[in-house]
């Protein structure tokens, strides 16, 4: 359990407080990683910082730097789940780069725009209709974007195999989420008077 930027409980409970409705959670499970993937497609077209002539050659551009940053951050938060998240990030990078190269920019941006619109609209519907709470990104944009893929993965691991980064993590996070949701409900009720 880290502190500050690497405080996984803090990040997970912040994000979790905005995602308690099962339909909203499912919507995020389906749409968060495609947002990450399609963003990497666009980032493929950013100018390279450096060309690496290994494995047929690839460019170190914003897409690659983003994937490395996300991967290292996730591993620093939790070595096991973070390593799986890093693997998924790099698989997204490989796939997005191949798809971007095949599509070319003139078609890629249209595919990305359509996918992003569908995914974002789905998430806002999840929050507005099912969660009845504004998305986390309205309260903390950077944390919401950075944590969303990892949060979805941790939730999937927890629900499918009972994974916890360490014993007591789930109970501690659940208590923090409940406290945050109660505080939010109290603020909401006070505003309605």
Image (cartoon, rainbow, N blue to C red):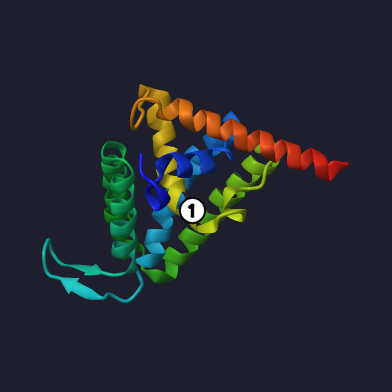
Instruction: Pinpoint residue 80: horizontal percent, then vertical percent.
Output: 26, 37
Residue shown at 76% from the left, 41% from the top: 188
In this picture, residue 40 sits left or right of residue 178: left
Instruction: Pinpoint residue 152: horizontal percent, then vertical percent.
Output: 44, 39
Q: Is residue 81 visible?
A: yes
In this picture, residue 53 sits left or right of residue 146: left
Q: Secondary structure at mark 1?
A: helix
Between 19 and 35, which is closer to the camera in this rendering? Answer: 19
Between 169 and 128, which is closer to the camera in this rendering? Answer: 169
Q: Residues within 10 Å of mark 1 (few under 14, many from 20)?
A: some
Residue shown at 35% from the left, 73% from the top: 46
Residue that lies at the very extreme toward the front in this rendered image: 3
Residue shown at 62% from the left, 40% from the top: 126
Residue shown at 26% from the left, 40% from the top: 79
Residue identified by numbered label 1: 143
Name the quadrant containing residue 175.
top right
Between 94 and 154, which is closer to the camera in this rendering? Answer: 154
Instruction: Pinpoint residue 3: horizontal percent, then vertical percent.
Output: 39, 47
């Amino acid at each position: 359990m880290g502190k500050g930027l690497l405080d996984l409980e803090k990040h997970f409970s912040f994000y979790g407080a905005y995602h308690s409705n099962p339909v909203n959670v499912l919507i995020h499970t389906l749409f968060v990683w495609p947002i990450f993937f399609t963003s990497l497609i666009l980032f493929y077209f950013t100018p390279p910082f450096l060309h690496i002539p290994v494995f047929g050659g690839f460019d170190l551009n914003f897409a690659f730097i983003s994937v490395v940053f996300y991967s290292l951050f996730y591993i620093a938060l939790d070595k096991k789940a973070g390593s799986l998240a890093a693997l998924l990030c790099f698989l997204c990078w490989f796939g997005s780069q191949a798809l971007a190269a095949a599509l070319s920019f003139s078609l890629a941006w249209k595919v990305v725009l359509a996918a992003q619109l569908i995914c974002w609209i789905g998430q806002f519907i999840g929050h507005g209709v099912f969660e009845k709470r504004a998305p986390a990104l309205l309260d903390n944009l950077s944390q919401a974007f950075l944590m969303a893929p990892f949060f979805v993965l941790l939730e999937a691991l927890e629900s499918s195999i009972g994974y916890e980064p360490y014993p007591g993590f789930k109970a501690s996070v659940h208590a923090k989420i409940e406290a945050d949701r109660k505080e939010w409900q109290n603020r909401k009720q006070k505003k309605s008077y």
